[in-house]
Image (tube, rainbow, N blue to C red):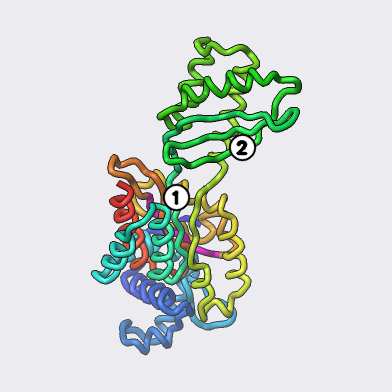
């Protein structure tokens, strides 16, 4: 069902709808007509309020849980509120100071990223997530060492001293001299470059016939680099912190949803794919419930914002995952400010 424009609602329907949504986001509980009338914010009788609530329910914006006579916003209603009615509140001075102070602590960037995830979790009372920028160290050498018949070990060394290795299948009977030739060729093209840069250069040389490699060595080089590039692409580097925040008092009545959400959070590959979709956004993106298939069953929301380096290049995504009753007006600008602060740190 498409979200109806805010302008299609009468002024009193908009007022009551906003009060129901804000009340629900604040308490996590359905809001009834008596509550609305008792607050004195609506100059209508409980009967008239119930009539408006029924109208909003017929539009698919509110729902009445079977355990309560009150109403709560549907995902459609939350989307209408977020896009057309929400008054965003800037982070407080205390929140900005806390974010900047946490990120200014000395240490490696990985430590700052983990601190960011914990900080967002603490401030939002949800789970904080940070997708770490892809590590692309400058490389010094790559060795291919024979281990056993048909097996070799490809060892890659970065300028920062970082070492990684991968197993590589070899054709039967491959001479050791081929390993040496491939190692020397790759190292000559890797030195001082990132792996992605080296792959492009080597690939161009091989296609153009300028590689000076025989067929066996060329095949080994291509398959060796393929192992590295495929492996890097399939390894999302994701930090998730604060899952315990999802087990608050309002979760006790909906433990199955929380269990499903915690299971979802274990699927880091899928979360990384979701956050990846926020990389090209100009601003913070909000995914509500079933708008994303990953959290369709748990009915959870994601608020995510890309962060950039000094050249404006997107290097990662930071965000919050929690129940649909997140305080969007407060969390959205908080995530956005954190992304900006993290970008300044990344430089």
The percent coordinates of residue 308 (x first, y second) are 33, 46
The percent coordinates of residue 185 (x first, y second) are 52, 20
Residue holding disc 2: 166
Foreground disc of the pair 1, 2: 2
Question: Mainly helix, strand or loop, the magenta region?
Answer: strand
Which quadrant holds residue 21?
bottom left
**Label 1: how many residues lie within 10 Å, few (<14), some (14-19) or many (20+)?**
some
| Magenta-colored span | 299-306
What SS does tag 1 mark?
Answer: loop
Residue in front for this viewpoint, 219 or 45: 219
Residue in front for this viewpoint, 343 or 302: 343
**Label 2: how many residues lie within 10 Å, few (<14), some (14-19) or many (20+)?**
some
- On the question of residue 8 being in view, the answer is no
- On the question of residue 325 being in view, the answer is yes
Q: Which of marks 1 and 2 is nearer the N terminus?
A: 1
Cα–Cα span, label 1 and label 2 = 22 Å
At a point 52% along the width and 24% down the height, the residue shown is: 186
Which residue extends farthest left? Answer: 93
Residue holding disc 1: 132
Residue in front for this viewpoint, 55 or 320: 320
At a point 60% along the width and 28% down the height, the residue shown is: 144
- On the picture, is 288 further left or further right than 149? left
At a point 41% along the width and 46% down the height, the residue shown is: 279
The percent coordinates of residue 243 (x first, y second) are 52, 68
The percent coordinates of residue 297 (x first, y second) are 60, 62
- The answer to whether residue 182 is magenta is no
């Amino acid at each position: 069902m498409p979200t109806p424009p805010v302008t299609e609602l009468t002024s009193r329907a908009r007022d009551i709808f906003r009060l129901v949504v804000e009340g629900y986001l604040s308490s996590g509980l359905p809001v009834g007509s008596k509550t609305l009338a008792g607050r004195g914010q609506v100059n209508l009788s409980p009967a008239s309020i119930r009539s408006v609530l029924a109208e909003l329910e017929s539009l698919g914006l509110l729902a009445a849980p079977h355990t309560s006579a009150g109403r709560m916003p549907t995902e459609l209603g939350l989307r209408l509120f977020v896009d057309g009615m929400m008054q965003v509140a800037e982070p407080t001075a205390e929140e900005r100071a806390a974010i900047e102070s946490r990120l200014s602590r000395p240490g490696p960037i990985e430590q700052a990223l983990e601190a960011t995830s914990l900080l967002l979790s603490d401030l939002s009372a949800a789970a904080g997530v940070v997708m770490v920028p892809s590590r692309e160290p400058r490389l010094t050498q790559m060795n291919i060492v024979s281990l056993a018949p048909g097996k070799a070990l490809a060892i890659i060394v970065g300028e920062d001293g970082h070492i990684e290795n991968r197993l590589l299948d070899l054709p039967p009977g491959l001479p050791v001299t081929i390993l040496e030739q491939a190692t020397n060729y790759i190292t000559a093209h890797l030195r001082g470059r990132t792996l992605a840069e080296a792959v492009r250069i080597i690939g161009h040389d091989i296609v153009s016939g300028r590689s000076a490699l025989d067929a066996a060595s060329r095949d080994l080089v291509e398959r060796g680099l393929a192992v590295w590039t495929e492996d890097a692409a399939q390894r999302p580097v994701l930090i998730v912190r604060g899952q315990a925040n999802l087990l608050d008092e309002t979760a006790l009545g909906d433990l199955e949803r929380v269990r499903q959400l915690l299971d979802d959070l274990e699927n880091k590959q899928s979360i990384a794919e979701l956050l990846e979709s926020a990389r090209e956004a100009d601003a913070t993106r909000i995914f509500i419930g079933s708008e994303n298939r990953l959290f369709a069953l748990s009915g959870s929301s994601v608020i995510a914002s890309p962060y950039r380096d000094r050249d404006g290049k997107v290097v990662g995504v930071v965000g919050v995952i929690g129940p649909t009753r997140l305080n969007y007006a407060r969390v959205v600008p908080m995530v956005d400010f954190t992304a900006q602060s993290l970008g300044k740190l990344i430089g």
